[in-house]
Amino acid sequence: MNGKKLGRDSGQRKALAKNLTYALLTNGSIKTTKAKAQFVRPYAERLITVAKRGLAKAEADGNDEIAVHARRVAASRLGNDRDVVQKLFDEIAPRYADRNGGYTRMYKLGARKGDNAPMVLLELVDNEAE
């Protein structure tokens, strides 16, 4: 995870990326600062791509056991939460099967009242919760 440090050490950055990605996949959208959204966006999109590729390879070979590795990779990056991994593979990844990246979008919401930090809404494209 190169790029932004966000004023945190590496352990805190990893936890932030995991928690924001978990929230994004669970809820379909999150409201956060622009810097955090830009930080977590590639992490979440890479995870969706891992799930997509695992499912595609399993379907092409006709063997569901091939997707197990992709599920384990996703689970390790999401804190081994079975519910979120199942949602990622059963609902989210198939929705983007024909899409080559760009699974998220950011809407600017203006500045936060307390510290004037730029806020954004980071959401999954084609979100069914809309």
Image (cartoon, grey):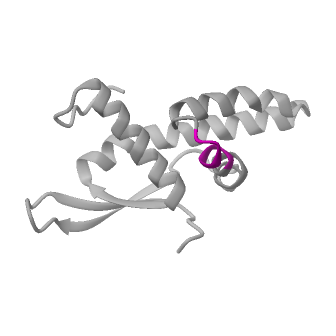
Instruction: Determine whether, in the image, residue 113 is placed left or right of residue 75.
Output: left
The verdict on residue 85 being magenta is yes
Report the residue at 11% width, 68% height from top: 113
Q: Residue 4 placed where, x, y %?
A: 24, 33
Give the residues in magenta. Answer: 81-86
Name the residue rendered at 69%, 51% in the picture.
98
Task: Name the foreground residue: 14 vs 81.
Answer: 81
Q: Is residue 4 left or right of residue 83?
A: left
- From the viewer's perspective, is residue 31 above or below residue 46? below
Q: Quadrant of residue 119?
A: bottom left
Residue 61, given in percent of the width and then of the height, sits at: 88, 30
Question: Toward the viewer: 85 or 36?
Answer: 85
Name the residue located 30 percent from the left edge and 33 percent from the top edge: 13
Prevailing secondary structure of the magenta residues = helix
x and y percent of residue 41 in the render? 40, 45
At x 43%, y 58%, the residue is 105
Going by the picture, which residue comes out furthest to the left? 115
Q: Quadrant of residue 67?
A: top right
The answer to if 22 sits in the magenta stretch is no
- The relative height of residue 124 versus residue 88 in the rendered view (above or below) is below
Residue 35 is situated, as x and y percent measured from the top left of the image, at 24, 47
The N terminus sits in image quarter: top left
Q: Which of these two is toward me, 99 or 67?
A: 67
Q: Residue furthest bottom?
A: 130
Query: Total marks drawn?
Result: 0
Apparent side of residue 16 relative to residue 83 in the rendered image (left or right): left
